[in-house]
Amino acid sequence: MTVTAPSNRAARWPTLRPWLGTAARLGLAAVWLIAGATKVGDLAASGRAVNAYQVMPYELATVIGAALPFVELALGVLLLVGLATRLAAGFSAALLLVFITGIASAWSRGLAIDCGCFGSGGQLAAGQAPSYLPEILRDLGFLALAGFLLIWPRTPVSVDGWLAGEPPVEGEDE
């Protein structure tokens, strides 16, 4: 009878997973904080960027565009401190799916727009080519971070852990 020890990779996962979760949480927080901060100074431009997608009436697009930076900043702060991490990851995933769908829709309809993800966005100048594929791939990467946090939201150095009364236990499943 042969007895084999568990693989090193399987043995390392319980130790590595919480720190990967922390990196995912802080990385996604940085994305939302930067995205919101670049738009909050010019809410009208943010509204025009949403309107450039041509999927809703102008009035609704401007309201959504004006609210979006504050939603992004709120998600960023929640993820930064690790409060309601699973909920923030869920909203992040939903918002990223909307963004990916919007970019794919603009691409398929032949619109020449800047996504407005990290700035004012809107119509591109004549002759300027949009970069839809890199934007979609980038957002899919961010979606993967949100998905990781949906599955494993408890991370070291987070309010969620402190509110639970103890730091996350190495290898603990949610």
Image (cartoon, rainbow, N blue to C red):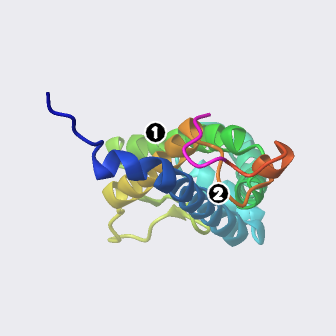
Outermost top residue: 1
Q: Could you tell me residue 137's position as x and y percent?
A: 36, 54
Mark 2: few, some, or many residues within 10 Å (few <14, many ≥20)?
A: many
First in sequence: mark 1 vs mark 2: 2
- Above or below, comparing residue 134 to residue 63 in the picture: below
Residue 43 within the magenta-colored segment of the rendering: no
- Residue at x 65%, y 60% (from the top left corner): 29
Q: Are marks 1 and 2 in contact (CB under 8 Å)?
A: no
Identify the residue under disc 1: 101
Prevailing SS of the magenta stretch: loop
Name the residue type under label 2.
Arg
Quadrant of residue 5 within the rendered picture:
top left
- Above or below, comparing residue 148 to residue 116 in the picture: above
The label shown at residue 48 is 2
Q: Secondary structure at mark 1?
A: helix
Q: Could you tell me residue 141's position as x and y percent?
A: 42, 53
| Left or right relative to 107: residue 41 | right
Can residue 140 be spotted in the picture?
A: no
Q: Could you tell me residue 130's position as x and y percent?
A: 36, 62
Please give the range of residues in magenta.
169-174
